[in-house]
Amino acid sequence: APGDPCDEPLVSGLPHVAFSSSSSISGSYSPGYAKINKRGGAGGWSPSDSDHYQWLQVDFGNRKQISAIATQGRYSSSDWVTQYRMLYSDTGRNWKPYHQDGNIWAFPGNINSDGVVRHELQHPIIARYVRIVPLDWNGEGRIGLRIEVYGCAA
């Protein structure tokens, strides 16, 4: 929770090369622009197709303890994600889905492009890589995402 020692923003300081994705509409929609409250490029990440095969991935460079996640839509657009899963990994090859209440957890996402929706994790996870998989998005728009992950050194 805010105020805890393990509640540092882990994404905002990362370089463009730390981000990857399944696809992007174009360079200005690339995953490196997917930072909360930033307006660079087209204002966030959007994949070339809005379907269930898309993902946004962050490499923290080393293992982090992750305590919370927040999402936002693409700046000033009709593009936002309404529900998503989170996968995590130490290798970038073998992915584990985040579980809560005994299920692969679907996080509620956004209801507009600029509000930030933050979720505390019931159980902190330790991982070097995090991958966000959109499950659903605004029907009037497409997948659009800016994220922040909170935690501390593992």
Image (cartoon, rainbow, N blue to C red):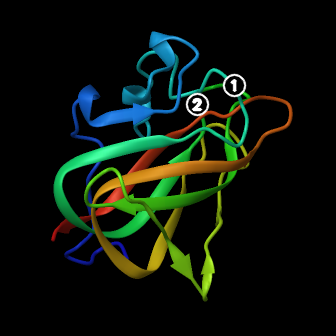
Mark sitting on residue 115 = none
Q: CA distance from mark 1 to mark 2?
A: 15 Å
Query: Do we see residue 44 in this rendering?
Result: yes
* Residue 39, image x, y percentages: 45, 24
Residue carrying label 2: 74
Of circles 1 and 2, which is in front? 1
Residue sitting at x 41%, y 27%: 33
Are there few (<14), some (14-19), or many (20+) residues within 10 Å of tag 1?
some
Callout 2: SS: loop
Q: Is residue 141 above or below residue 86?
A: above
Give the residue type that dot 2 points to.
Arg
**Figure label count:** 2
Q: Nearer the viewer, residue 130 or 91?
A: 91
Callout 1: SS: loop
What is the quadrant of residue 24 in the picture? top right
* Residue 59, image x, y percentages: 27, 45
Q: Nearer the viewer, residue 104 or 147?
A: 104
Q: Are marks 1 and 2 in contact (CB under 8 Å)?
A: no
Give the residue type that dot 1 points to.
Asp
Query: As drawn, is 14 to the left or to the right of 125?
Result: left
What is the quadrant of residue 145 in the picture? top right
Taking the view exactly as shown, the residue that stands out farthest to the bottom is 101
Residue sitting at x 59%, y 26%: 47
* Residue 2, image x, y percentages: 35, 72
Q: Is residue 16 above or below residue 59?
A: above
Query: As drawn, is 69 to the left or to the right of 134?
Result: left
Residue sitting at x 15%, y 71%: 154
Residue carrying label 1: 49
Query: Do we see residue 38 in this rendering?
Result: no
Residue sitting at x 32%, y 50%: 92
Query: As drawn, is 144 to the left or to the right of 91?
Result: right
